[in-house]
Image: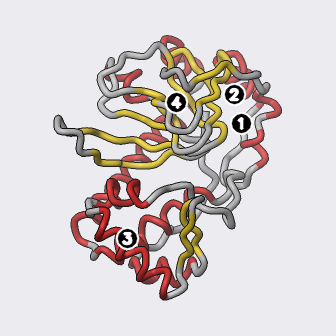
Amino acid sequence: MSTGAKAGIQVPCSFCPLRKQPAFRDFAPEELEFVHRFKKGELRVERGATVLAEGAASAHFYTVLAGWGFRYKLLADGRRQIVNYVVPGDLVGLQGTLMGEMQHSVEALSAMTLCVFDRERLFRLYEKHPSLAYDVTWIAAREECMLDENLLAVGRRSATERLAYLLSFLRDRARGTGFGVEGRIPITQQHVADTLGLSLVHTNRTVRKLVARKLIGWGEGGAAVLEPEALAELAHWDAGTRIPRPFI
């Protein structure tokens, strides 16, 4: 964890703000009690801080309680590929827990609050609470589905369609998490370029096209989706049926 991390005040799981959000399924009483004992505390991570670094072997993994982050990989010359974004309810560091070390890095896109879990106790979850073990598996499978869609966007969508997809996807991910759908998505055009495999110049031109069509707004705080249905139609993307998703 970088110097951007600070110890935070623990919020009891019974008062977790995510439990009030419609995007998430609630815990059974015995599950809630286990997760409450499983959780070690919280960390506050400042914007731009490295949460986990590629190659690191951390003793912990995390659930995002508040804020945004992104997963990325670097080439030897410093070129960056953002592979996905993390929002409240997402697990961070599960890969490192199961494979011994991280295969990608995670950076805070905004100030974040993370619930901290001891990776050594993950196996107790599998032993004692198969329903929670299923939830962890569901989260991992959902991540795979999102990566499939992201790869399709980079490989087959036009630049305009890629940007329309990315912003539609991020808006959909934020819905129900308490982030505030009508707020701005806190990304820069460099983040967009590094996600979609475009140059910064090409990204800027593409942003201006969607702004001119009044589908999005763009400012210092990031992107605002103005016409979500039209933007998703442009991207040839459908979020599908939304069901309450699990979290730990």
Is there a contact, CB below 8 Å, between mark 3 and mark 2?
A: no
Q: How many C-alpha atoms fall within 10 Å of the one at disc 2: few (<14), some, or many (≥20)?
A: some
Which amino acid is tagged 4? Answer: Ala
Residues under labels 4 and 2: Cα distance? 11 Å
Is there a contact, CB below 8 Å, between mark 4 and mark 2?
A: no
> What secondary structure is marked by label 4?
helix
Circle on res. 110: none
Is there a contact, CB below 8 Å, between mark 1 and mark 2?
A: yes
123 or 209: nearer the eye? 209
Which amino acid is tagged 1? Answer: Phe
| x and y, in percent, of residue 199 in the image | 26, 63
Question: To which residue does mark 2 refer?
Answer: 31
| x and y, in percent, of residue 211 in the image | 50, 80
Residue 246 showing in the rendered view = no
Residues under labels 3 and 2: Cα distance? 47 Å
Question: To which residue does mark 3 refer?
Answer: 204
Is there a contact, CB below 8 Å, between mark 3 and mark 1?
A: no
Q: Is residue 68 left or right of residue 17?
A: left
Circle on res. 133: 4
